[in-house]
Amino acid sequence: MDAEYRQGEHICSLYETEEEQLAVAADYLADGLRAGERVFYVAESQEAIQRFRDALKAVGIDAAARAQRGALVESTHAEAHLANGSFDSERMLGLLNEALENALNDGFSGLRTCGDMSWLLLEPPGAEQVVEYEAHLNRFFHGVRGAGMCQYHRSRLPEHLIDHALTTHPSVIVDARHKPNPYYRSPELAVGRAANPDGVRFKLGELRQG
């Protein structure tokens, strides 16, 4: 993958297939593990987590050994984003803050998170908070020893959510290339703007050419 990652980043990864999603997640989190960070991966199910472990194995990471040492933490959507059956932005931010503090207290060099956002397809209670949540994550990660990646399925998720994702992440991965995102807006502007789903195709075309 053509990628370089740093602490403080909040990345939007747009993918078309599960194979692509897993490859990007494994590359990103393996990089964190090699840098001495604790990594936190959230997926749809335990079966999806096992497929992620297989992807880590393909890049030379023994997932079971890393999990035993506390370097790899995994969770399902039901345990993280949708605890108690709904999404709550403040609760998730609190969970991440606690996870970051615990990682540093346990001697890791930071916390690197990666979550697939396909839980939005369920339209759970509280899903309307996702734009505010994504915008606040930029403040959360800025200046701390942490980084996060949010993975959006380009074809399955509606285009208004893809548009919001592009607005709330300073960098983006498209076609396995990590690059600055010219469509990013400050948290204040991102939360208050209306989505422009009709512009998504144009934005993706520009990102692919850049």
Image (tube, helix red, strand yellow):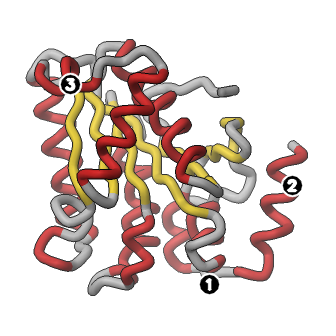
How far is mark 3 from mark 2, CA to CA?
Answer: 40 Å
The residue that mark 2 highlights is 206
In this view, the residue in front, 155 or 83, is 155
Q: Which mark is residue 203?
A: none
Query: What amino acid type is highlighted by mark number 3?
Result: Ala
Query: What amino acid type is highlighted by mark number 2?
Result: Glu
User: As drawn, is 173 to the left or to the right of 80?
Assistant: right
In this view, the residue in front, 24 or 173, is 24
User: As drawn, is 191 to the left or to the right of 94?
Assistant: right
Under circle 1, the secondary element is: loop
**Quadrant of the frame with the N terminus:** top right
Query: What amino acid type is highlighted by mark number 1?
Result: Ala
Under circle 2, the secondary element is: helix
Q: Mark 1 and mark 3 in contact (Cβ < 8 Å)?
A: no
Of marks 1 and 2, the one in the foreground: 2
* Residue that appears at 60% across and 24% down: 4
Q: Callout 1: few (<14), some (14-19), or many (20+) C-alpha neighbours within 10 Å? A: few
The residue that mark 3 highlights is 64
The residue that mark 1 highlights is 194
